[in-house]
Amino acid sequence: MYEFAYHKPASVADAVKLLAADGEAKAVAGGQTLIPTLKQRLARPTALVDLSAVRDLVGITVGGGKVTIGAMTKHVDVASSADVKKALPALAALADGIGDPQVRNRGTIGGSIANNDPAADYPSACLALGATIKTNTREIAADEFFKGMFETALKPGELIVSVSFPVAEKAAYMKFAQPASRYALVGVFVAKGPAGARVAVTGAGPSVFRWKEAEAALGKSWGVAAVENLKASASGLNSDIHAGADYRAHLIGVMTKRAVAAAG
Amino acid sequence: MPKVSMTVNGKNVSAEVEGRTLLVQLLREKLGMTGTHVGCDTSQCGACVVHVDGKSVKSCTMLAVQADGAKITTIEGLATGNDLHPMQAAFKEHHGLQCGFCTPGMVMSAVELAKHNSNPSEHEVREWLEGNICRCTGYHNIVKAVQAGAKAMAAAK
Ligand SMILES: Cc1cc2nc3c(=O)[nH]c(=O)nc-3n(C[C@H](O)[C@H](O)[C@H](O)COP(=O)(O)OP(=O)(O)OC[C@H]3O[C@@H](n4cnc5c(N)ncnc54)[C@H](O)[C@@H]3O)c2cc1C
Ligand code: FES
Ligand code: FES
């Protein structure tokens, strides 16, 4: 790792100021992605702005048909929250399946969404549930947020403050984990909620995406039968040593069926 | 250089570190506590697991500055004098190790599991140990040791 300066502001305003003052500074949340990246010298920030002392960024509130989660809320706290388990059990289960216990004890929802790893779990929940990502300056709909591989709508120095998920009538996430890393080889989040029937796929392409054909079929009649014979296209999907594009396309179908069955 | 203070196994320590100093480097290189191992240094293997404020974390994936003010427990902090902690005793009894390289991390991870689950099933133990890799044992005896250790910890309460 290259050396960097370290700051630990206590408010969002101070964190934003530190990031604005130095274009090469970077926020650090749980560090579960950023620290490995720094070790590989894939990034060379001049300073890290640690968000862990910003109390306003932590916590879960349920109300008004929404589950709102502060950016610095750790995966373990979403997974074990009685409120999330009650309002959106699929989201708690998703958080419980991220990485391993030590990653869940440090990693945060804000870090996961800001990073937009092509195989990360949370972005699929954001898209399928029609979440809104609140930053220090604006609110961004999930549909506008995830732009491409490791790319989001965030501007330099902009911080995620919280993520609001509308509560859905039915929802489930099914992940086919890559056996070594536990990241999704393919993960599918299905939801029947205020935004209609939605199917979001992670792990399969360069970035999370919606499977529109499955959404249309489920919108007409929700149930496994609607997606039974639907085949996802392999065009543009990832192909690597773990799985070819054809196999990933096949898994999208299988995981979608399983998720719809699990959602009931 | 930033100065950090924390408690490690109940003792107050402070040290000057660089921003980039990892918690595991502080423990091993500055404090000379080599019980915590570095296996992969890429957040995969769990040899470096310690407890930070009661939660297991990979100390190779946390900066020392991020642990400022925290309560750290390492493998050296489990035994009481010559009496092994029940989880350590269970690893010994059930032969849950061969070379022992992964063992400090396995034990620290298992102790956190046992805190919320005093009677974990084989499946629950295997799921929990997702982040701990062992190159020797094939995990079989580790799983038995963790189950026995969890029961022993509950009984010792
Ligand atoms: C072994 C291992 C296995 C994993 N398995 C999975 C898995 O199965 N599924 C999965 O989804 N993830 C997995 N992860 C990633 C994990 O979920 C990370 O926690 C997550 O990707 C990043 O969150 P973090 O809080 O650690 O962020 P950091 O690493 O601290 O930051 C990541 C990036 O986000 C930026 N950032 C952080 N917070 C904010 C904010 N509030 N606003 C704006 N930008 C911000 C940082 O500047 C940085 O660029 C795994 C990680 C490891 C090490
Ligand atoms: S040395 Fe920390 S996870 Fe391997
Ligand atoms: S006992 Fe050798 S790595 Fe586990």
Image: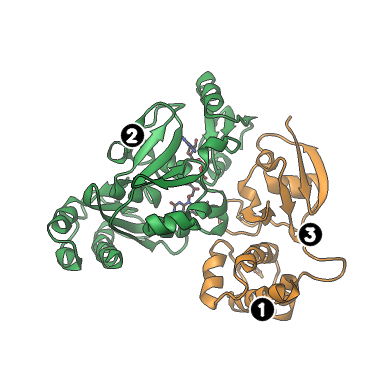
List the residue tagged with mark 2.
A140
Residue at (60, 66) in percent of width and height? B116
> What label sits on residue A87 in the rendered view?
none
Q: Colour of chain B?
A: orange
Q: Quarter of the picture for ligand 3?
A: bottom right
Q: Amino acid at mark 3?
A: Gly
Circle 3: element type: helix
Considering only vertical position in the picture, is B60 above or below A175? above
Instruction: Using the rendered view, name the quadrant where residue A140 is placed.
Output: top left
Considering only vertical position in the picture, is B9 above or below B25? below
Circle 1: element type: helix
Which one is nearer the viewer's eye here, A220 or B95? A220
Q: Give the alpha-carbon distance from disc 2 to disc 1, as whole Å.
A: 50 Å
Considering only vertical position in the picture, is A135 above or below A241? above
Crowd around label 2: few <14 · some 14–19 · many ≥20 (10 Å) = some
List the residue tagged with mark 3.
B77
Image quadrant in which the N terminus of chain B is located? top right
Crowd around label 3: few <14 · some 14–19 · many ≥20 (10 Å) = some
List the residue tagged with mark 1.
B148
Instruction: Using the rendered view, name the quadrant where residue A213 is placed.
Output: bottom left
Task: Provide the chain ID for the residue under circle 1.
Answer: B
Task: Provide the chain ID for the residue under circle 3.
Answer: B
Please tell me whether mark 2 or mark 1 is closer to you in this view.
Answer: 2
Q: Are marks 3 and 2 on the same chain?
A: no
